């Protein structure tokens, strides 16, 4: 009988979360959340692997849901992508990024660049540059404080419009980062064409990093290729001191991950900006 109760509980749990999932993932729910200003940005530091110097803060979106609490991107970004809502959400993230930079500037904090995750759909829409121009003008923030992260998989289509928009941004002085590197199928020639600044190696590779193993060889090869092309390399998902030390020995330029700092609220980030990261 006890077991029955447990099964029933699990049954309700599953249905409850399914229902919630359905409620979260419909167009009206997300539009409503935009209207109610329920989306917030968290910021995760990216630091120099040797000196610990703060290089950038990555903006990561969260949904501060009135019932469910803090909802992570995995629970709404995929739906936003397929439904096209990512275009509006993406514009919102840019607006909030510039608002935040302007606020830190008003507090006389030393400003560091913020990197923003941009979906290929958002770039395909074609008006990303005008949205950017508007943000820069209205908030009085230098364009060099913005960095754009685009996933490797979104470049695979060899989409000309995406390539053109990216090089237009690059020409404006915006740093371009390729995200989740190693999980897609982009060719080296494509990377070279784009004149990218930073290669972010996916956290799956960091996880499998161990001395003398294939993971180490992969990093070594990627780092030497990136350096030959004038790019910096970031290792994502660094969780241990051992990983950090191996990455340093491999001349990895920058690191990001829980070992350095978890994504922080804007208030916490304001403290991190002033702090020295001791690695
Ligand atoms: P991403 O761009 O690869 O971001 C890194 C993710 O790894 C973040 O998850 C971050 O919290 C997590 N992470 C950081 N360090 C560690 C670590 O040491 N260990 C582990 N296990 N995880 C770590 P998050 O914030 O849940 O974001 C997930 C994904 O959602 C992002 O992956 C990105 O693809 C997408 N995303 C987040 N914000 C935005 C946004 O504003 N726009 C778009 N288009 N996508 C976004
Ligand atoms: Ca990213
Ligand atoms: Ca990534
Ligand atoms: Ca990822």
Image (cartoon, rainbow, N blue to C red):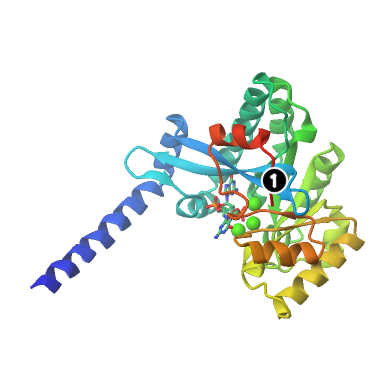
Above or below residue 25? Residue 218 is below
Q: How crowded is mark 1: few (under 14 residues within 10 Å), some or many (20 or more)?
A: many
Label 1: state its secondary structure.
Answer: helix
Q: Which residue reaches farthest left?
A: 1
Q: 264 and 96: which one is in front?
A: 264
Residue 151's x, y, as percent? 68, 56
> Residue at label 1?
123
For residue 107, what is the image quadrant? top right
For the point 34% across and 45% down, the residue is: 68
Question: Which residue is outermost to the bottom?
Answer: 213
- Judge from the rendering whether residue 225 lies leftward or rightward of residue 180; answer left or right: right
Determine whether, in the image, residue 65 is placed left or right of residue 269. left
Residue at the front extreme?
278
Ligand 4 quadrant in view: bottom right
Q: Residue at x 21, y 60 (%)?
A: 12
Residue in the image at 69% along x and 67% along y? 184
Q: Nearer the viewer, residue 20 or 6?
A: 6
The one nearer the camera, 244 or 231, is 244
- Residue 101, image x and y in percent? 66, 29
Q: In this view, does 274 lie above or below 241?
A: above
Residue at x-position 60% and y-position 55%: 259
Residue 28 visible here: no
In the image, the residue with mark 1 has its CB under 8 Å from the nearest atom of ligand 1: no
The total of numbered circles placed on residues is 1
Q: Nearer the viewer, residue 129 or 240?
A: 240
Q: In which quarter of the image is the N terminus?
A: bottom left
Relative side of 90 to 134, left or right: left
Q: Where is residue 204 in the image (x, y as percent from the top left)?
A: 62, 68
Residue 97 in picture, x, y percent from top left: 63, 33
Q: Can residue 13 be seen in this view?
A: yes
Among the 4 quarters of the image, the one containing residue 264: top right
């Amino acid at each position: 009988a006890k077991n029955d109760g447990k099964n029933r509980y699990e049954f309700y749990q599953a249905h409850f979360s399914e229902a919630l999932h359905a409620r979260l993932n419909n167009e009206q729910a997300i539009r409503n959340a935009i209207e109610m200003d329920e989306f917030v940005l968290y910021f995760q530091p990216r630091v120099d692997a040797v000196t610990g110097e703060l290089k950038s803060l990555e903006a990561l979106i969260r949904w501060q849901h009135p019932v469910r609490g803090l909802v992570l991107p995995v629970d709404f970004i995929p739906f936003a992508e397929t439904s096209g809502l990512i275009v509006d959400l993406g514009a919102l993230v840019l607006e909030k990024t510039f608002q935040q930079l302007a606020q830190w500037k008003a507090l006389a904090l030393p400003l560091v660049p913020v990197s923003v995750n941009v979906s290929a759909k958002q770039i395909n829409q074609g008006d990303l540059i005008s949205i950017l121009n508007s943000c820069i003008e209205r908030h009085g923030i230098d364009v060099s404080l913005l960095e754009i992260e685009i996933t490797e998989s979104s470049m695979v289509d060899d989409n000309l419009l995406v390539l053109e928009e990216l090089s237009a941004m690059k020409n404006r002085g915006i740093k371009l980062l390729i995200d989740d590197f190693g999980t897609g199928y982009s060719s080296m020639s494509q990377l070279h064409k784009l004149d990218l600044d930073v290669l972010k190696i996916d956290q799956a590779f960091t996880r499998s990093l161990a001395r003398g193993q294939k993971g180490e060889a992969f990093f070594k090869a990627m780092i030497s290729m990136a350096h030959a092309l004038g790019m910096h390399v970031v290792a994502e998902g660094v969780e241990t001191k051992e990983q950090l030390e191996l990455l340093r020995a491999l001349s990895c330029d920058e690191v990001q991950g829980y070992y350095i700092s978890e994504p922080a609220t804007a208030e916490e980030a304001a403290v991190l900006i002033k702090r020295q990261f001791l690695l």
